Amino acid sequence: MSAVLEFVAASGAITLAAFEQVGRLWLFTWRSIFALFRPPYYWRLMGQQILRIGYYSLPVVGLTAFFTGGVLALQIYIGSDRYGAEAFVPQIVVLGITRELGPVIAGLMVAGRVAAAIAAEIGTMRVTEQIDALTTLSTNPIRYLVVPRLIAAVITMPILVAIADSIGVLGGYVVATTTLNFNGSVYLKNSIDFVTNEDIYSGLIKAAVFGFIIALMGCYSGFNSKGGAQGVGTATTNAVVAASILILAANYLLTSLLFVR
Amino acid sequence: MTQPKVELRGVKKSFGSKVVLDGVDLVLGNGESLVVIGGSGTGKSVMIKCVLGILRPDAGQIFVDGEEVTDLHGRARDHMLKQFGMLFQGAALFDSLPVWENVAFGLIQGHGVKRKQARDIAIEKLAKVGLSADVAMLSPAELSGGMQKRVGLARAIAADPKVIFFDEPTTGLDPIMADVINDLIISTVEDLGVSTLSITHDMASARKIADRIAMLYRGKIIWQGATEQIDQSGNPYVEQFIHGRAEGPIQMELRR
């Protein structure tokens, strides 16, 4: 009997904790969005963050996009070869990259890089009382720390994805022309003729949403970190895991909103 | 009776089931130096954070200059905080900014002073705490603990506050540096004519900087009086604390 009670109590505690987390995150999100529309804005910090989130993510996003495009071309070729449909490789690669893989791969890579860095930085500021110090110096920590990162991420992610899209298609092109005997100019013409503006825009909209998720989860985990070094470590892990899961969930939701009519 | 600078009435704060403040009543007079003593984990920091609005008390009221500030938020809170300065336990300097920008932070962000002018003020404040202008360009990570505390003090006094809070100003410093910081606190308080509330468990420091001492135990103020009276408090808790005895009415919570 007591074992049953214990089980019920434990599951109840877990449920309560989960609701508490959701409530906290919701409150944090709401406060951040509210702060987005109220001055003062810290332009200098925003510039720094654009550099950190956007510019320094270019190598990692570019490399992953290149290999993803390449492997996509290879797999589609191998698969469609069975039906004699291998001529469709460029069309499927460009569609897959712009609609799904460009934003998702870039989102996940930036989540690993940036959400972790944000959570570690803000988490350290939390445990060393720097966030409390901001408050005592009449500076709203949400406006000073969260808003610049949110704006920077929402601005730079679409740019990163636009670059990732181009490099991804290039990856497919390189594989197709060097190992699959495609004619380079035909490949490019097929890609460009097939892709529509909507394919590209939808990917960029996804990118902006992913940018918001990445910065928000990094800041949220950092703000709520407790204890010392270990707490900051946990916050960093949580930020990356939560951002990645939310990106994939949001991706499904956005795809169904943008494409299913 | 003259208007107290800061007053707490029946302030309560709990975290989950743990009661930290259980009805604190405390008055900080104008120009007074009050030191609150108490063991680690008795809620001294929580009390200060309630006054500053970093934490919201569960019950009770807080007054500044006779006006209730318990539920202030947003701009009104920022405005109120402009007359407060705080020195944090670990100095809490912003490690992404050079020393001078740390000192000038409140001036630039809160008071809208131009960067160049704020920088001159910062260097002047650094001189007040005995640091040369060369230090201004360093990053906080390059400074020793004692120097970081001094920069923290310079930051706390940069915007000419009316009230300064010191959270364990001497903790983690060697005895000589601790005394240097004590002297700095006394001289800045005299120069600026501010009211100060310090929390500490360092009795040497408390005796030196306090006009009045109050002791916090189990979330309540159990004794308060002038510094000279602390040796004749007649309170067994205070006796045990100021003499640092393991035996006595205060039982250390060794297990949580």
Image: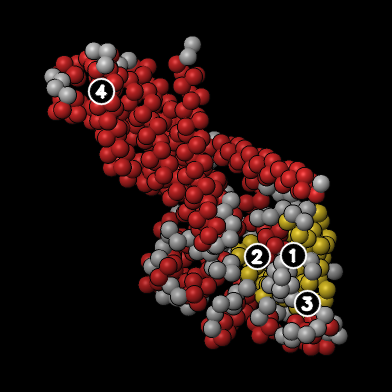
User: In this rendering, would B10 be left or right of A217?
Assistant: right
* Picture quadrant of residue B227: bottom right
* Residue type highlighted by circle 1: Lys
Q: Chain of mark 2?
A: B
Residue beneath disc 1:
B5
* Residue type highlighted by circle 2: Lys
Query: Distance between the Cα atoms at labels 4 and 1?
Result: 79 Å
User: Label 1 near label 2: C-beta < 8 Å?
Assistant: yes
Q: Chain of mark 3?
A: B
Binning the other alpha carbons within 10 Å of mark 3 as few (below 14), some (14 to 19) or many (20 upward) gives: few
Q: Which mark is residue A78?
A: 4
Residue occupying the point 48% across, 60% down: B94
Residue beneath disc 2:
B162
Q: Report if residue B225 is visible in the image.
A: no
Residue occupying the point 78% across, 72% down: B217
User: In this rendering, would B126 be left or right of B40?
Assistant: left
* Residue type highlighted by circle 3: Gln
User: In this rendering, would A72 be left or right of B228?
Assistant: left
Q: Chain of mark 4?
A: A
Residue beneath disc 3:
B251
Residue occupying the point 79% across, 66% down: B219
Marks 4 & 2 on one chain? no
Marks 3 & 4 on one chain? no
- Secondary structure of the residue carrying numbered label 3: loop
* Picture quadrant of residue B123: bottom left
Query: Distance between the Cα atoms at labels 2 and 1?
Result: 9 Å
